[in-house]
Amino acid sequence: MKKLNIGVVGYGFMGRTHSNAFLKVANFFDVSYQPVLKTICARNAERANAFAAKWGYESVETDWRKLVESPDIDLVDIASPNDTHAEIALAAAAAGKMVTCDKPLGRNPVEAEAMVTAVETSGVANTVWYNYRRFPAVVLAKQLIDEGRLGRVFHYRAKFLQDWTISPALPQGGESLWRLDVNVAGSGVSGDLLAHAIDTAMWLNGRINEVSAMTETFIKSRKHNLSGQVEPVSIDDACAFLARFDNGSLGTFEATRYARGHKALYTLEINGEHASIMWDLEDQHRLQYFDHRDEGRVRGWRSINVTDRDHPYMAHWWVPGLQIGFEHTFIHQLADFLVALGEGKSASPTFREALLTDDVTDAVLQSGANRSWVKVRPR
Amino acid sequence: MKKLNIGVVGYGFMGRTHSNAFLKVANFFDVSYQPVLKTICARNAERANAFAAKWGYESVETDWRKLVESPDIDLVDIASPNDTHAEIALAAAAAGKMVTCDKPLGRNPVEAEAMVTAVETSGVANTVWYNYRRFPAVVLAKQLIDEGRLGRVFHYRAKFLQDWTISPALPQGGESLWRLDVNVAGSGVSGDLLAHAIDTAMWLNGRINEVSAMTETFIKSRKHNLSGQVEPVSIDDACAFLARFDNGSLGTFEATRYARGHKALYTLEINGEHASIMWDLEDQHRLQYFDHRDEGRVRGWRSINVTDRDHPYMAHWWVPGLQIGFEHTFIHQLADFLVALGEGKSASPTFREALLTDDVTDAVLQSGANRSWVKVRPR
Amino acid sequence: MKKLNIGVVGYGFMGRTHSNAFLKVANFFDVSYQPVLKTICARNAERANAFAAKWGYESVETDWRKLVESPDIDLVDIASPNDTHAEIALAAAAAGKMVTCDKPLGRNPVEAEAMVTAVETSGVANTVWYNYRRFPAVVLAKQLIDEGRLGRVFHYRAKFLQDWTISPALPQGGESLWRLDVNVAGSGVSGDLLAHAIDTAMWLNGRINEVSAMTETFIKSRKHNLSGQVEPVSIDDACAFLARFDNGSLGTFEATRYARGHKALYTLEINGEHASIMWDLEDQHRLQYFDHRDEGRVRGWRSINVTDRDHPYMAHWWVPGLQIGFEHTFIHQLADFLVALGEGKSASPTFREALLTDDVTDAVLQSGANRSWVKVRPR
Amino acid sequence: MKKLNIGVVGYGFMGRTHSNAFLKVANFFDVSYQPVLKTICARNAERANAFAAKWGYESVETDWRKLVESPDIDLVDIASPNDTHAEIALAAAAAGKMVTCDKPLGRNPVEAEAMVTAVETSGVANTVWYNYRRFPAVVLAKQLIDEGRLGRVFHYRAKFLQDWTISPALPQGGESLWRLDVNVAGSGVSGDLLAHAIDTAMWLNGRINEVSAMTETFIKSRKHNLSGQVEPVSIDDACAFLARFDNGSLGTFEATRYARGHKALYTLEINGEHASIMWDLEDQHRLQYFDHRDEGRVRGWRSINVTDRDHPYMAHWWVPGLQIGFEHTFIHQLADFLVALGEGKSASPTFREALLTDDVTDAVLQSGANRSWVKVRPR
């Protein structure tokens, strides 16, 4: 088995999920590459060392430019805040490294386009961690749709509701709260939560052509952790939008961090002429499937416990009925990436595919600002 | 349409559900008899008059013997406490009246046998209000079982959980709390809640041959409303039993009034070789159905919203998706009774069928007392 | 108890729900008026006679003008298609009759305004049957909101999903399918399903100021039952809209008759700073309530079984844990109407209140047509 | 951090869950011992080598006696079939190794007693992998009970339903199906599924004093994988029992592998005077909690999403709202074991505690055989 030397930038939430994936993938999947946790890179040396000890990294680096240039590294994984994605990816691609990047690809389509160009110019394998697609139940949904079971599609709806920023006492910025700082994050719930919903939506239901959005910042200013001053909040705290898909179906999307009672309620539903599908992150192992072709008297939403061996990815885990967790989706994506790598390809979503999500997010933000329908940039 | 003059004994909870059924059945079902609320009978004249005014009874009677003998009455409905069932039914049958009786039939099989003999000797139409069978979803379950969809049955389980008697301050006896007085009720949860569960179980899954039970009275004494004294409590507060059905399947049953958090959680489940069914009173309009013959990848419990026009009784109500309530089950039973009457028959469960439930309840109480397996009396 | 002579126009679905309410209200509520089913009015004399027999109407009328003018009638109930509402209401009000009207009030705000003027000019009691507000769980939601438990409100979302018009073979128009004929109905899901959602939303969360909508007619032409010809379909088959409430909260609304698998999935949710509430027509007896002030470790969505005696309306029905059905909401509204009548008032929503819903629906349709945000007409 | 050299016996389902736990525990928990996957031991050398490669074991051994005696090994983990537990544990304890053993401890109390004696005589740290206790929601239940929130307990009920042995074509015995071979497994669902339910029940609700059980073998003979012959099946395919706990509460338990539609439906519920708790393996991250002391009008079952940082174990994983899987329970138990080890103790359940579960299982099997109430052996 070939070794694949990994350099990870960032030791936050995503640094942990990525590290776990690199470490475990070969225990559960038959892959021809064995990832090796070579180097963790982060500005804070003390914390980086502690992280390295916890996860078994061989070395620590505090300057990502050195990591990118190191001949010891085969793959650069970007798990750092959004404002670092483009710069690191461009350098890594230029250095001929494979690049795996957390989502969203860039803070905006301009950054994202440059990143696509970079990896395509240098021809390096690449993928973006839109991990929510990799829940077995969501992949099963994709299979059922691809098999044509739904017929003509009428509706797609998704929402992603959280409640962790309701307190006005919560500050913004800094290591743990950069998601509230527009300069670092690029946007609020649009690039964070809606990006997942949009990525999955287009994967399942095709291109979105145009959107009409409503955005809101409920709490207008918060103390900034870096300046120590109360500063304006410029991210979107909440965003809802109407969409028209290329296949003629109607979409409704909503995300917020002000939905009291919901920690991470990501739901999606698609209604077709013959069948409908629903999924809910809080019941991640189930797929709800309704098939109108079932005999009328016993027709009903089927609650499919997606843990059987013939369900996506599940033959690699335990026994039917037993569940896997959130972090497994990263392992799935990595397994797919490594399989694709063996075939000289990149795993979906590639940078190019992820750019399309940035395009939609961008149109959504524009629409929210100018209160009109906005067409998504054609590619 | 022929008039059917009704005399109801009892104005309590069941007096109301029965009155409502007699009053409404012809608005929703095509029946050849029009029930007329002729006489309400109860010992307390003042309350009986108020009840008559509320429901439109033409007259009031305080002595059930007069009601039974009245030439104005075609059908005597027994909605009074359990200790009155046998005496009234015997007199009514002797007077040639049809008899509809609330459940359980008697306080014990001796009373129940006498009641069966009485109605069969005089040849009068009769039925027992085991209304829980008449939920559309439960009738659908019966249809699916009768169609042989389950194959060999392995398991049946039912429970009926309530929590209304937990407080030691609750008294026993008298008009509103006779269910706690063993002399009036005959037994506690066995004759009250388990009787429903047993009736449905035998209807769906056939005869129960033997049982092993555990009964308990958690609160040993309570003030009695009639004597004003603290008196021993002799009913079973809770009862669970194991059962063997004649078809080889295993049964588990439980009822209690001490399950904090449950007002009326009556659930039933049957597991067959090919298919399984679950139902729950708190989701009364849904039937959960699992069919192993469904294609593996999309196999799951189907949540059937039993409100379509091809579902039992539902064509008589509103439009698909809209629900009916608890009291509708009495209307369904009455509609079935009136249809059967037109054909010169009695509607199930007849007194004879309901006697079998008393037999099982009796075996359960015996088993609880002597801590051994007890065979149900053969009939 | 004073008699209240009722004349009902229309014997369809709503004719039945209204008749049932008039007939039953006094059995369950202490009202000072006893409704009497005096006259049913409909163009088809044969069917009207059959309906009268089923429900016990004393007489039949085929010309609503005669009904309206009849000295025997105290209250004219409009249960006929939308295109008849205004004309009948104006005549009834002019004749000094009380008027109860099914929803939506008019096909458009012009009709609705005239109706408001008519009943206010003549000073007759009036109400519009927005019955979905009268589910006990929805009224409980209203109480909790009015008690200030939610704090600042951030979000309101509602959807009403059905699937009964997916087949292109379904015709439009005529007695049973007038809801698909824009001339009769005025609009499609907007005036039918969204009207309920909007009425409840404004009742719970206050005025809606502006909207951005997307409407679609999926099936462009259908055979018309009256002409026998294939004709264009001009109703909205589906409609989704974004809204801004006067209190600063964001709203999302959606309705469709093309959501395969859903018969009548009407859901609503409101998220406040301190607490959130969800309700779902398919679990009509439950209210989901989340209160962030609960102790953290045991905080969770509470599934309130709204069947206790201290829950709205429930003391009038059975015992805790036992459910009521769809039609009970009409009885509740009628009970409220009769109580208000005794106090010389009209029950909410009055014609004037219901006009506001027509205003929002109108803004939604405009917005869908011109693809822009539209302000709701100020009143 | 001290190294802890692990020798695992068995590479089946449990060999994988244990290996995963040893490998990952230090990534997520602060432990003072770092487990090292030293040796995997199994009879089939080829498969053992493949397993070692997959999981990174340093060496392979085909004779467990050599493993036990090896000075390289600090801890012997028994993940092999039940008939090997006692022999290996006795030898390991005699060799002074720590012993972690999969459940049930022995095939019967005689074996289990010997194992207890062995580890206590040699004074080695020990624990039994009753992992289902380690779901965060179950630990939260334990905390709430220990805090006295329930008051007097009336009821405990648990069931564990599977459906994987319904086909008569399924053989018994051999590497993958030893659970159907009574000589290897010791019993059927009693020692397999009920053991989990009993362990948790006694942990939460105290000692079980006596039981009345019903057992059944639905399919009387199956081909044996080792002999190639059709042989009698001697395990219990299904088992239900009534129980009386030492605290006066009533218990009902059921397990089966013939409940069509359920892969692993393990549910538990406890009803107390003031509060009740429910948990369900298929919703493993939720705890249902009902507290009667909540304000009446908004009282309801709380669905607690047990993923917050103040919930058991969850601060070690991701962020609130995101779930963990089945295998994490083994990591939790190992973390507890390693913490206890640092304090010179064993983690619960120790061999001595697990013996009590074998006692109950034994009483259950006796009761099933002799159809009478059986007292659990006093200890």
Image (cartoon, coloured by chain):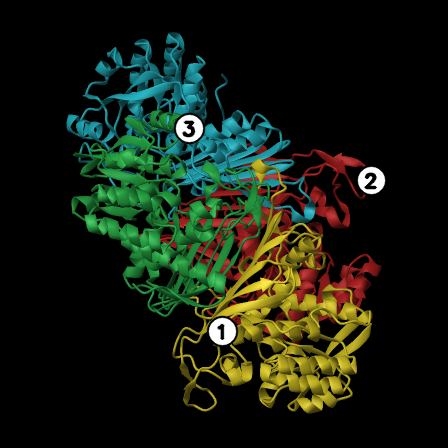
Chain colours: A yellow, B cyan, C green, D red
Q: Amino acid at mark 2?
A: Gly
Camera-nearest label, 2 or 3: 3
Quadrant location, the N terminus of chain B: top left
Residue at the image point whose x is 68% and y is 34% from the top: D219
Name the secondary structure under disc 1. helix
**Residue A368, horizontal then vertical, whole percent:** 49, 73
Within-10-Å neighbours for mark 3: few <14, some 14–19, many 20+:
many
**Residue C36, horizontal then vertical, whole percent:** 24, 32
Q: Residue D104 or A251: which is nearer the viewer? A: A251
Q: Chain of mark 1?
A: A
Q: Amino acid at mark 3?
A: His
Q: Quadrant of residue D62?
A: bottom right
Name the secondary structure under disc 2. loop
Q: Could you tell whether D86 is left or right of A262 in the image?
A: right
Q: Chain of mark 2?
A: D
Distance of label 1 from label 3 (alpha carbons):
55 Å
Distance of label 2 from label 1 (alpha carbons):
71 Å
Q: Which mark is residue D228?
A: 2
**Residue B273, horizontal then vertical, whole percent:** 64, 35
The residue indicated by pointer 3 is B332
Name the secondary structure under disc 3. helix
